[in-house]
Amino acid sequence: MLVTPKEVPRGLACHCICPGCEHPVQARQGTEKVWHFAHAKAEACDGAYGISVHELAKQLIRERKELLLPALKVVVSARGTGGENFVEQEVVFESKYVHLDDCKAGRRRDEITPDLSGSRKGRQILVEVTVFHRLMPEQRQRLIDTGLASFEIDLSIFKTQQASRELVEDAIFRPPGNRRWIYHPRMAEVEATLRARLETRLEESRAAWEKTEALRKAQEAEWEKKREALAARDNMLPSPFRPYSVSHEPVLRPVSELGWKASFPSTERWQPARKAFCARLGLPESLVDAVMSTMTRRSHLATTNPVELSKEWSEALGVPAAEIFQYFREAGCTQD
């Protein structure tokens, strides 16, 4: 049993030994320093402090036969076809106190000896207390393999904070955030339910993505057919009227003869022209607006001309330059 310096006689009369090295220690109960234990002989014992905190925690739980269980929350996640992240989760129960019918130091079970083993209403629960050393993966797996409920209490706060009986007791029985389930029998059942729910969402997402992708490909194919039809129509025009020669260079009148207006047309002119352009070529208005919105200020119009602008827009939209010039005329950008 672990004791504090306040509970025993002063000096070596306490008849105490170090829980680390099992050598005699004396209770120092001075007037200047906090009462503490010290080795009777100045021998190094690096593990005494961590072992003391660990053993005290187990002793307090055995004495009170009480546990603060962590909340049981199960979370599953997966990435959808479109890259989105799907999460399903369920809180089976919140953190809660339980009183044990029995609590003893852990006995060896299936190649592992847990720190504590308690029982309540015929069901067993295993407890691991960690201070300076984390629970190793192989230890965790062995606890899971027992098939019994088990959880960990993390007291690593005492690496940097000096422990006392009161502080250790508070850390064991008050904060729910320093403990987590290693295994709980209900985990598998809840996880299976959540995964089935998640798979349904993934399937719905996959079907929606495939439908959107098929629609996109169909639209692309339709736009390509319309572009090819427009190109074929332009090739049937007499040479002087074609928007592009064989080298795809514009064959147009000099800029000075086109009556280019260095001012933005009125809304009443360009909006109907824009809609007619989209309808005629089967292009989405959002796409056309994104390209044509580059010409929005007088300064832009003053530094460009119909030939250059038609080349830029026809390349961006994949349509013949003749269609761009028709838009210029209908929108009121030229005076010809």
Image (tube, rainbow, N blue to C red):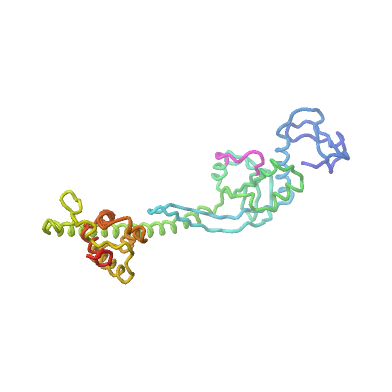
Residue at far bottom of view? 268
Whether 65 is drawn above or below 204: the answer is above
Q: Quadrant of the N terminus?
A: top right
Quarter of the view holding residue 331:
bottom left
Relative placement, left or right, of 38 versus 239 is: right
**Location of residue 92 with respect to 139 vertically, above or below:** below
Magenta-colored stretch includes residue 203: no
Residue lying at 64% horizontally and 49% vertically, measured from the top left: 178
Query: In the shown orientation, is residue 26 left or right of residue 122?
Result: right
Out of 84 and 145, give the one closest to the viewer: 84
Res. 207 in view: no
Whole-percent x, y for residue 160 in the image: 70, 41
**Residues shaded magenta:** 129-139
Q: Is residue 138 magenta?
A: yes
Q: Nearer the viewer, residue 4 or 66?
A: 4
Q: Where is residue 129 shown, x and y percent of the image? A: 65, 44
Answer yes or no: is residue 170 visible: yes
Q: Residue 181: x percent and y percent?
A: 59, 50
Q: Residue visible at 12% across and 59% down?
A: 237
Q: Quadrant of the C terminus?
A: bottom left
Q: Residue at x 65, y 57 (%)?
A: 96
x and y percent of residue 130 in the render?
65, 42
| Relative to 166, 296 lies left or right | left
